[in-house]
Image (tube, helix red, strand yellow):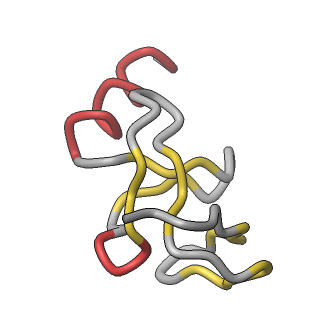
Amino acid sequence: MFKKLAKIKYLPNNFEIIEHGDHVICSISGKKIPLEKLNYWNVDLQEAYFSYVEASLKKENQN
């Protein structure tokens, strides 16, 4: 299903594909995220999150 890891630059309301691929990896869970389902990321840390759950966990651990 997943073939190639994409390299992404995360921007405030969008992302830029640096190297084409079909997925990225969640920095919390390690799950593969298809680019068409990528909705959660941190611009400052340049990290992707599988869902709001992982994004919330990251935010909680930063405080």
Residue 38 at x, y percent in the picture: 37, 68
At x 51% / y 20%, what residue is drawn?
A: 62
Is the residue 50 above or below the residue 37 in the image? above
Q: Between residues 2 and 37, which one lies in front from this camera angle?
A: 2
Tally of numbered discs: 0
Residue 26 at x, y percent in the picture: 46, 42
At x 39% / y 57%, what residue is drawn?
A: 33
Q: Classify residue 16 as left or right of residue 58.
A: right
Q: Classify residue 6 as left or right of residue 30.
A: right
Image quadrant in which the N terminus is located: bottom left
Is the residue 14 above or below the residue 24 in the image? below
Tell me where residue 36 sits by quadrant: bottom left
Residue that protrudes farthest toward the right in the picture: 18
At x 32% / y 24%, what residue is drawn?
A: 57
Q: Between residues 49 and 30, which one lies in front from this camera angle?
A: 30
Tell me where residue 2 sits by quadrant: bottom left
Is the residue 29 above or below the residue 7 in the image? above
Residue 17 at x, y percent in the picture: 68, 83
Q: Classify residue 52 as left or right of residue 42.
A: left
At x 62% / y 66%, what residue is drawn?
A: 4
Is the residue 13 above or below the residue 34 in the image? below
